[in-house]
Image (cartoon, rainbow, N blue to C red):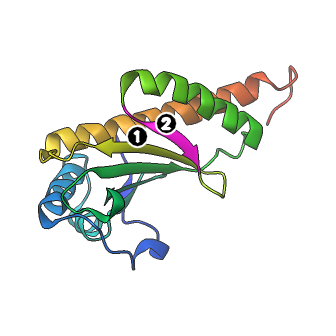
Amino acid sequence: MSTDIAEPPGALAPLQSSLSPGRRACAEAAVRRMGADDTAARAFAAHGAIQVDGVLLSVAAAAGNESGRWLATAQMPRPDSVTPSRWNEALLLANGQALLTAPWIFSLDPGGDALLLMPLDPGLDDARTLAAQFDGMLSLCKAVAEGAEALAESALPRGASA
């Protein structure tokens, strides 16, 4: 997978990861496996967020419990060519299919960005498995964005462009 991996936007820099040291090490190793450089991988371990191919990927301990269930999220902006109603439609369709394959679900943040939420097993400590989970989330985000754009294009009158 070709990825553009970078530190999260500056607004996230003050955040501190709620993960235990062991989980931070696992998360850091996972994004290194995905191609993150040293700086981005360390920032991910420290802050729990990283930008990958335009998607803000983050991890945190659920309900502030460092050793219990943890949660991965992927925040994806609505493509410019997709209206909010088409975006909602695409996310609802994706939810119906995604729930058949994994315990993940799309939601919307107040700004209209999609949030893909996935609880992670409390015992997950293998960087390869975590990297695979992240890759799956990113692939689903990409597929949903492409599907939403195709849906928007199919709604245009013949000969018109977005």
Q: According to the image, label 1 marks what residue?
A: 138
Residue 142 numbered mark, or none:
2
- The foreground one among 123 and 155 is 123
Q: Is residue 42 visible?
A: yes
Depicted 81 relative to depicted 156: above or below: below
Q: Residue at x 75, y 22 (%)?
A: 154
Residue 19 rendering spot, x and y as whole percentages: 24, 64
- The foreground one among 35 and 114 is 114
Q: Residue furthest bottom?
A: 14
Tag count: 2
Q: Residue at x 36, y 29 (%)?
A: 102
User: Magenta: predominant secondary structure element?
Assistant: strand
Amino acid on which disc 1 is placed? Leu
The quarter holding residue 38 reads bottom left
For label 2, the SS is helix
Residue 134 rendering spot, x and y as whole percentages: 32, 43
The quarter holding residue 16 reads bottom left
Give left or right: position of 95 versus 36. Answer: right
Q: Residue at x 37, y 33 (%)?
A: 103
The quarter holding residue 24 reads bottom left
Cβ atoms under marks 1 and 2 closer than 8 Å: yes
* C-alpha gap between disc 1 and disc 2: 6 Å
Give left or right: position of 67 versus 148. Answer: left
Magenta stretch bounds: 103-108
Amino acid on which disc 2 is placed? Lys
Q: Residue at x 65, y 57 (%)?
A: 110
Give left or right: position of 63 versus 108. Answer: left
